[in-house]
Image: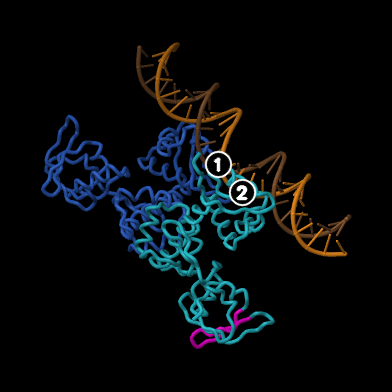
Chain colours: A blue, B cyan, C brown, D orange
DNA sequence: CTTAAAATTTAGTCTTGCCTAAATTATTTT
DNA sequence: AAAATAATTTAGGCAAGACTAAATTTTAAG
C-alpha cells in the first residue's frame, strides 16, 4: 500500500517532529494543543499513522508518539517547504516576518518538488528562513543548530542573534520594533535572578526582557 | 449561514463558469467529464451548491446548471487566482507555459487575498496570463474578449495571436516549437474546405494546422 | 409513436477526519 | 495505599464528498 500523504497527515507529522526535537515522545495532549484538535481525535489519527505501511510513527498507548525514519523524512519535507516559502515570500513579495507564517502554512502542502527546487535555486539555496530557523537540506537532513538561548546569557556576554523561535505576529512585530532580529549584535548588561529578566543592549538602546522572550531568541556567543 | 468555500466547491464553480461561457447551462455529464468525477456524484454536489444560502448555482433537474451572481463571483475569484499565479510562475520562476497549469491548479485554492494583491502588483496588474487568457479584474469582472478563432480565417488574412485556449502540456510544447504563441504575427495562405485545414505562415515557415489546433488559437485580425 | 440509447437522478455505501461522552489508565495527593 | 485528578483511549456519530448499482427521464431512431 502506498503512503497516504494528506494535508492532515503532514500537519501531524510536522507537529510531532517539533515536539520530539527534545528527544522525548510527543504526548497526545501536547499534540492536540499544537494542532488545535481534540485529544480523542489525535489518538485516532496517531493510531492510523502507526498502522500505515510503512509506518509513519511509532506509538505505544499512554506513552506518546515518535516519528519513524519514513515519518521523519515526510516531516522534514513539509518543514523544508514551509521555511523555503517563508524565505521566498519575504524576499520576493515584501512580506514581513510577522505576516509570513500563515501564508506558508497553507502553501506548504500543495507545492510540487519542482516548485521547491525552483524557489530554493532562486534564493541561492538558503540555509535559514527569515526567523533564522534552519532549512532542511534537499536530501532531507536537518543541519545541526549550535545556537544558545538568550535566556542562558549573563552580564557582559555579547552575542549575535541567530534565530527567533516564534510565530505570533504580535510578538514578532514587537521584537521588530525593539530591533531584535536575526543578524543583530547584542550585549547583556544585567540579570535579575528573581524574575530571570535580562537587560539587553541593542545598538544604543537597552531593553529588559522576560523569560517569555529570552527563551525564544537563540544566539551565537562571541 | 455562511458560504462553505472548499477546494471542491471552487473546482465545481470554476468548471461551471467555463462551461457556461457560451451562454448555455452546463450539463451534468459535461461537468463530470471536466472534473473527472462520476456523473452521479456531480448531481449530488450540484444540488448542494444550489441549496447553499445564498445559492451558488441555479439548478433544474435534467436541465443543467448555471451560476448565480454569488457563484459567478466565487468562480472569477478562483480564475483570477489561477491566471495571476500562472503569470507569476512564468515570469518569476521560469516555468514554461506548458508546465504552469498543474501547479497553479493547486495553488489557486490556498492563496490569500493579500497574496493575490501582492503578485498582481508585482506583475504590474497584468490583463492576460501566459496563454493570453484574460485575467478577471480585482473587483471580479471578466473583461470582454474580442478575439476571433483562427479557424474562421481564410487565405490572405493576417492576424496577431492573442490567446491559446489549451492546457495540455504536449500540445503547448508543440505550439511552442511551431512559434505559435501570443503576440506572434501570422498569415493564412491556404484553406482546405474538405478537412478545414489552414496553412499558416509564421515568420518564414508555413504550417498546415487542423481544426483541433485552429479552434484553440484566438487572434486579432489586422 | 414506440423503442432503444443516452443522460440523469436516486439510493445506499465508503473513507477521511473530526467531535462528544463515557470509560479507562496514570499520576499526584493525602 | 487509597482517593482525587489528569491524561488518554474507546465507542459511537457526523459531515463532506466521492463511488456503484439501479431507477428514471429525455432524446433519438426506426
Identify the residue position indicated by label 2 in the image.
B46
Give the number of the mark in front: 1 or 2.
2
Identify the residue position indicated by label 1 in the image.
A51
Chain for numbered disc 2: B
- Residue A78: percent from the left, percent from the top? 43, 51
- Residue A3 visible somewhere in the drawing: no
Q: Is residue A96 positioned above or below B176 on the image?
A: above
Answer left or right for C2 relative to A32: right
Assign a secondary structure to mark 1. Answer: helix
Magenta stretch mostly in which secondary structure?
Answer: strand
Tell whether position B205 is magenta.
Answer: yes
Chain for numbered disc 1: A
Q: Determine the residue positioned at 41% across, 44% down.
A: A17
In the foreground, B56 or A123: B56
Answer left or right for D21 relative to A49: right
Q: CA distance from mark 1 to mark 2?
A: 36 Å
Tell whether position A177 is magenta.
Answer: no
- Residue B156: percent from the left, percent from the top? 55, 87
Q: Is residue B24 positioned above or below A211 on the image?
A: below
Q: Quadrant of residue B215?
A: bottom right
**Numbered range of the magenta stretch:** B197-209
- Residue A69 visible somewhere in the drawing: yes
In the foreground, A67 or B5: B5
Assign a secondary structure to mark 2. Answer: helix
Q: Are marks 1 and 2 in contact (CB under 8 Å)?
A: no
Crowd tier of the residue under label 2, counting other residues whose Cα lies within 10 Å: few below 14, some 14–19, many 20 or above: many
Crowd tier of the residue under label 1, counting other residues whose Cα lies within 10 Å: few below 14, some 14–19, many 20 or above: some
- Residue A106: percent from the left, percent from the top? 43, 50
- Residue A15: percent from the left, percent from the top? 41, 42
Q: Are marks 1 and 2 on the same chain?
A: no
Q: Determine the residue positioned at 53% across, 51% down.
A: B71
Q: Is residue B166 positioned above or below B203 on the image?
A: above
Amino acid at each position: 500500500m502506498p503512503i497516504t500523504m494528506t494535508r492532515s497527515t503532514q500537519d501531524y507529522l510536522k507537529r510531532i517532529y517539533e515536539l520530539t526535537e527534545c528527544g522525548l515522545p510527543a504526548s497526545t495532549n501536547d499534540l492536540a494543543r499544537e494542532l488545535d484538535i481534540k485529544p480523542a481525535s489525535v489518538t485516532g489519527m496517531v493510531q492510523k499513522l502507526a498502522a500505515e505501511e510503512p509506518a509513519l510513527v511509532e506509538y505505544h498507548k499512554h506513552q506518546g508518539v515518535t516519528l519513524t525514519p519514513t515519518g521523519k523524512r515526510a516531516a522534514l519535507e513539509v518543514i523544508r517547504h514551509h521555511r523555503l516559502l517563508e524565505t521566498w515570500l519575504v524576499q520576493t513579495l515584501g512580506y514581513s516576518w510577522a505576516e509570513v507564517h500563515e501564508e506558508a502554512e497553507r502553501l506548504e502542502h500543495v507545492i510540487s518538488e519542482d516548485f521547491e527546487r525552483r524557489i530554493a535555486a532562486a534564493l541561492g539555496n538558503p540555509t535559514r528562513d527569515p526567523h533564522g530557523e534552519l532549512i532542511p537540506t534537499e536530501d532531507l537532513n536537518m543541519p545541526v543548530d549550535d545556537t544558545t538561548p538568550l535566556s542562558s546569557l549573563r552580564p557582559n556576554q555579547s552575542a549575535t542573534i541567530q534565530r527567533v523561535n516564534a510565530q505570533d505576529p504580535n510578538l514578532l512585530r514587537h521584537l521588530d520594533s525593539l530591533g531584535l532580529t536575526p543578524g543583530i549584535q547584542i550585549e547583556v548588561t544585567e540579570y535579575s535572578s528573581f524574575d530571570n529578566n535580562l537587560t539587553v543592549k541593542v545598538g544604543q538602546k537597552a531593553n529588559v526582557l522576560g523569560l517569555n522572550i529570552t527563551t525564544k531568541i537563540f544566539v551565537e556567543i562571541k
